[in-house]
Amino acid sequence: MNRTRLSVRLDQRTQQRLADEARASGKSESELVREALVAYLVARDREESCLDLARRHDLVGCGKGLPPDLSSSPAHFEGFGK
């Protein structure tokens, strides 16, 4: 696998925690950082938007008797937030 190098600046406490974890796990600091970054990126890929969540819970379009342009027409926002 072709790898590139990345430099990261850490505060002293984070560096010490990373070193302690590397020692305890028997892994290198680089390996731990790679694993953490991959886990973060995978989690970000799985994040759902508010619209996705509303769709999953059948909340999109659940309001009855409301105008179809409620979220997009400026006329419906008059006085909103006052």
Image (cartoon, rainbow, N blue to C red):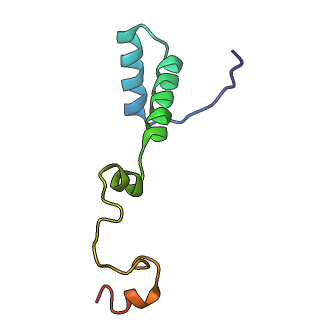
The image quadrant where one finds the C terminus is bottom left
Above or below, 57 against 28 in this view is: below
Q: Is residue 5 left or right of residue 73?
A: right
Q: Is residue 25 left or right of residue 42?
A: left
Please give the name of the residue rendered at 67% of the width and 26% of the height, measured from the top-left corner: 5
Please give the name of the residue rendered at 48% of the width and 23% of the height, measured from the top-left corner: 35
Residue lying at the far front of the rendered structure = 65
Please give the name of the residue rendered at 68% of the width and 21% of the height, measured from the top-left corner: 3
The image quadrant where one finds the N terminus is top right
Q: Position of residue 14 (x, y in %)?
A: 40, 32
Label count reads 0
Above or below, 50 against 76 in this view is: above
Q: Quadrant of residue 17?
A: top left
Q: Position of residue 66 (x, y in %)?
A: 32, 79
Residue 53 or residue 39, whichever sits in front? 53
Q: Position of residue 8 (x, y in %)?
A: 56, 34
Q: Quadrant of residue 23?
A: top left
